[in-house]
Image (spheres, rainbow, N blue to C red):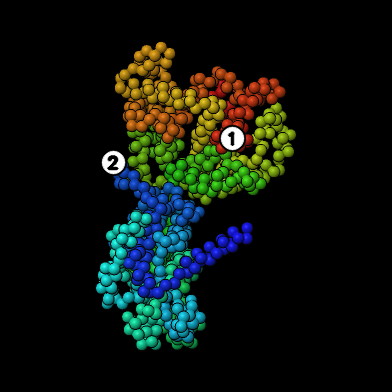
Amino acid sequence: MKTELKSLLNKSIQNDQEFEEIITFEAYLSLITKEPWVTRNSTQLLHDMMLSRGVDHAMTTGKPVKHTYHFFEDSDIIGPYIVFGQQKAKENLVEKIHNASRGMEASKRLWILLGPPGSAKSRSMDGIKRALNQYSLSPAGKTYYQLLPTVDERLKEKALFEENGIFYLPSPLYEGPLQIIPQSIRKEFTTELTKNIDKRSINSWLKKHQHYDKNFKIEITGLMSPYSDFVIKGFMKSKNLSFADLIPYLKVKRMIFDARTKTGIGSYTPRDEKSQEAGSLVGNIDYSLLPRFGSESHPLVHDYKGELCAGANGFVEIHEILKLSDKFLYELLFATQDRFFKPEGQPPIPFNGVIIGHTNFHEYNMFLGNETFEALRSRTTFIEMPLSVNFKQEEQIYSFTYSNENRNWKKAMKHQAHIAPHSLSFLSLVAVMSRLYNSKQNENLSLLQKALIYAGRADSGVDNNMAKMVLDEFEFHKPSEGTFGLDPRFIQNIIENTEHFQISEYAANIKKLHQESGDHALLTSIALQNPCITPLDLFVRLEHSLKDQFANQKTKLSHYVEKIAPQAKKWIFGQIASDVYSAILRDDTVIETTWKKYTDHVRAYAHRAKVKHDVTQMDVQPDEKFMQAIEQYLGIPDRDTFRKELSDAIASVKYTILLADEPSYQNAIKKYVFENEFKASENMKLLGWIKSGTSAANVHVKEQEHLNETIKYLIETKNYCGKCAFQALTITANASSIIT
């Protein structure tokens, strides 16, 4: 034990030493010849970081290539700040950073994320800040900043270390080492440096880091800060050095970005306009230093503690950016466009970082209507981040925090409730439906159907042509869908309030529930194994929360409570019933066999061919009655079109793949098998017993065993617990379409 702990501590010390690496300027130049990317500027570093976790390219005929950047969903680098969905916003942001990294016009624009509350704007920025830290700790993200030598005793207290009577100060803007090179020789310097690059090392490096720009060129941009310039010139004067003589004295330090210490990362949140202080953004005069240096305009008197100073060669986030006064907004614009900002009474300070702000639609609309910002608007790029309209993507947001796998509820039952299957789907569906308009393409199309179409499901009850029209309508005519409705924070509060209620109720009433179990003592004892949040629980808490939140908005309240929530509940109950079908049947082969029979008949129909009879094996016409029965459960309005498309799909992939990849197909086949082949069988006695409330004493032992096996299947295969399994059986038993 002691040996293992000592080993870990030693490893930690070694890591710290590596990340605290300080090398000579000459060693840094040598490193460049092997790894030229250590000279990257802020936009280049951000770009490489975002591509470092891999990119998928999806090509669709007639549409732009879809790029999926795994960076945004990689917890190893981004931590808990995973952003689900937001495909367009992610692509747009990476595109802007890519263009800026190449010195294009995007580098002179102020970038602002625009979206309603809860659309992951702040979360995205937190993820980038965290990733910058993690990336800079990795070999691929290695970069350095300049240390400043001085013999000025007045600066001794600011030194990182002392060597041979020379104090080494960190550059206040974390300036890149090459920025110290005089402008007059930069071009010749980079040319000569490039000649010495080891191509073999570079090729090896590129194989390991394929996202790097193969045409990367070493460029020196940006000036030294007045502070750094003064210190360097003062040192050269004290030692009577030329620039060439200065080189041996120079040292550089490994750059580790850290938002907590404002190392390369700034973050500014504006107060109300009257109390906004420029110093928080650009830094202040340190009056304690006036006695030492004598003048407010002296470069060493400025404290460089503003957020723009922190991210001058890194990254700056501006919260609620459009709440800034016009003076502050134009300061940001100068920083991005002219590459400097100017504190009052001080010379201009160079800025080579990336600024990203975020705002909501209320502030945005005020910004558009203010003539003061006319010049600013043309120099600002907005990246829209609406709320998700895909309920499966929405569900990912909640699953990341509340799923049983992430919460490890079995080990912490006293503090957490089990989340029943389909619970998070229910709330996600409600949230998405609240963000949608009624379709103009089809007035009879429900919001539920639209939500299913947007999620790419085949069980929306509309044909593919109508589904395409709905998707096109969203793409070109309904851009504001997702800019209103229930936000994720509202949904998360419902989950947490429901959990608190269920745990409290479970603890307070466990004995009472046992006493009142009545005829279903066996079932109730199964149901009381642990606190559990079910879709029905969430439906009840949702109604309470909606009535509290929208008490003064009767129209919206009615829309949510009377239309959206009941539709979502009914659909979710159908999904629950499908799980119960699987549990009672417990034989997937019958489902696969039925699906194969259907697809065989569909292919024969499409090609005007015949099929083999199940019993006689003689060639017969496709069974129209059988196909229509299946299609009734699929909700297919245009049978001919669907059959042709399905036949073409089967020609490309195996029929089993289509069944496995499409839940709506599975559910339809389960319902067909259940209602047409098992409805009159012994299997139905289970649900009949539950519905009727027959006393357990009057139920055959075999049926009780069947109940236990069914619940066991739901628990082991479908992630139910005792309570939600029993509730699922009750829901299915009381479905009039199943039990007559």
- Tell me the tag on residue 715: 1
Q: Residue at x 55, y 44 (%)?
A: 405
Q: Is residue 290 visible?
A: no
In the picture of the structure, the residue carrying the numbered disc 2 is 61
Q: Residue furthest front?
A: 3
Q: Residue at x 48, y 25 (%)?
A: 589
Which quarter of the image is occupied by the C terminus?
Answer: top right
Q: Is residue 638 left or right of residue 395?
A: left
| Badge 2 element | loop
Determine the image quadrant of residue 736. Answer: top right
Q: Position of residue 416 (x, y in %)?
A: 62, 46
Residues packed near mark 2 inside 10 Å, few (<14), some (14 to 19) or many (20 plus): few
Q: Is residue 605 left or right of residue 3?
A: left
**Vertical placement of residue 218 versus 425, above or below:** below
State the CA–CA distance, disc 2 to disc 1: 44 Å
Q: Position of residue 653 (x, y in %)?
A: 36, 32
Question: Which amino acid lies under the numbered mark 1 shown in the image of this protein?
Answer: Ile
Q: Position of residue 504 (x, y in %)?
A: 67, 45
Question: Which amino acid lies under the numbered mark 2 shown in the image of this protein?
Answer: Thr
Q: Position of residue 621 (x, y in %)?
A: 35, 15
Q: Nearer the viewer, residue 207 or 482?
A: 207
Q: Nearer the viewer, residue 478 or 608?
A: 608
Q: Is residue 244 visible?
A: yes
Which mark is first along the chain, 1 or 2?
A: 2
